[in-house]
Image (spheres, rainbow, N blue to C red):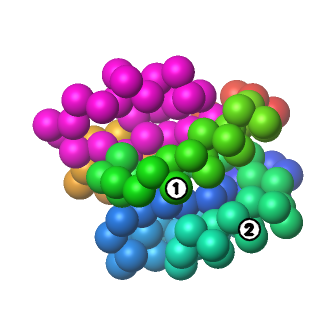
Amino acid sequence: MASALKKIRILIFEKERIVGLELKQALELKGFDACQPRSIMNARTLINRNHFDLIISDNTIINSKLIQLINKYTNQTNIPIIYLHTKDSTSFNQRKKYGIVASVAKPYNSKDLVDSIINKFQKII
């Protein structure tokens, strides 16, 4: 499906490395170009060198430098964010102003999330 679309680049911030890898692989199987930074410094390098069409961010990552980096990038580019949160999270409403287009409760099914992303980008293009 995504192969008919332009190569869409997605930046993934997932606290659980294995879960992020599974999501990255599911996205790549559908033709997306997905990156999962290993560190804040790696994320900064990726953002400075590349354009991304979407950010998927886990709200359980409590790192002010990462949050500042995401906020700075989204403010400069108006990039949409899909926000991954725990069911008991209350901070989603506090972060709505940062370009969040969707919220997904954890645990999530990678296939369902990828299908939602495909549908979203097919509507945009």
User: Which disc number belongs to residue 66?
Assistant: 1
Q: Tell me if residue 5 is in the magenta stretch.
A: no
Q: Position of residue 38 (x, y in %)?
A: 53, 78
Which mark is in front, 1 or 2? 1
Distance from the alpha carbon under mark 1 to that under mark 2: 13 Å
Q: Which residues are magenta?
A: 80-103
Nearest the viewer among 93 and 5 is 93
Q: Which residue is mark 2?
A: 46
Left or right, residue 121 beside residue 108: right
Q: At label 1, which amino acid type do we have?
A: Leu
Nearest the viewer among 109 and 56 is 56
Q: Classify residue 30 by image quadrant.
A: bottom right
Q: Residue at x 85, y 66 (%)?
A: 49
Q: Tell me if residue 100 is in the magenta stretch.
A: yes
Q: Position of residue 118 (x, y in %)?
A: 61, 45
The earlier-in-sequence mark between 1 and 2 is 2
Q: Quadrant of the C terminus?
A: top right
Helix, strand or loop at disc 1? helix
Q: Position of residue 114 (x, y in %)?
A: 51, 53
Q: Classify residue 9 by image quadrant.
A: bottom right
Nearest the viewer among 37 and 112 is 37
Q: Residue at x 23, y 54 (%)?
A: 107
Nearest the viewer among 29 and 39 is 39
**Mark 2 crowdedness (10 Å alpha carbons): few <14, some 14-19, many ≥20:** some
Q: Is residue 34 visible in the rendered structure shown here?
A: no
